[in-house]
Image (cartoon, grey):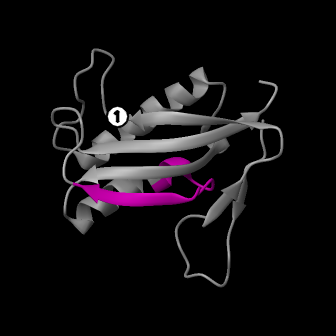
């Protein structure tokens, strides 16, 4: 288990996430591909449902983390992509991500984009994690 250190600053505006995260020396970084809302058969899940797609993305991200020998609390940062021009849609995705991570409120960026790669895809979650170097 690593000890990701979440960094906050009272010199910056309050945010629902840490502003930075550090990894201990001799750690191994894990760069995950963007987690997509795809079922095992490759079809897009929760079509038209931003919150539902965010949940599926996070479930798929946890599977990828586990396959790499990591877990949710090993995540250093995320980037949440939402195919929208609506702030309400961004917030809908963010609310799911924030609830999923809970107290491990890693540095995150929330971005509205024009389109994502799969048919009917509205959400994608990129992440970087860290584990002890000997794993």
Q: Would you say residue 109 sits in the magenta stretch? A: yes
**Magenta range:** 98-113
Residue 75, given in percent of the width and then of the height, sits at 61, 44
Who's the residue at 53% across and 73% down the image? 15
Q: Which of 8 and 54 is in front in this view?
A: 8
- Compared across the picture, whether 65 is left or right of 35 comes to right
Residue 19, given in percent of the width and then of the height, sits at 60, 67
Who's the residue at 67% across and 82% down the image? 10
Q: Would you say residue 114 sits in the magenta stretch? A: no
Residue 37, given in percent of the width and then of the height, sits at 31, 33
Quadrant placement of the C terminus: top right
Q: Total marks drawn?
A: 1
- The image quarter containing residue 70 is top right
Residue 30, given in percent of the width and then of the height, sits at 61, 34
Q: Above or below — where is 12 with respect to 62?
A: below
Who's the residue at 48% across and 56% down the image? 98
Q: Mark 1 points at which residue?
A: 36
């Amino acid at each position: 288990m690593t000890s990701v250190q979440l960094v906050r600053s009272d010199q910056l505006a309050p945010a629902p996430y840490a502003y930075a995260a550090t990894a201990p020396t001799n750690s191994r970084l894990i760069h995950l591909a963007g987690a997509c809302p795809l079922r095992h058969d490759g079809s897009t899940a929760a079509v038209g449902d931003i919150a539902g797609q965010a949940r599926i993305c996070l479930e798929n991200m946890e599977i990828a983390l586990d396959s790499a020998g990591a877990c949710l609390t090993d995540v250093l940062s995320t980037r949440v992509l939402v195919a929208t021009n609506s702030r309400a849609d961004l917030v809908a995705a963010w609310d799911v991500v924030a609830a999923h991570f809970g107290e491990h409120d890693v540095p995150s960026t929330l971005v509205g984009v024009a389109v994502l790669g799969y048919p009917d895809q509205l959400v994608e979650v990129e992440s970087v994690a860290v584990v002890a170097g000997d794993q």
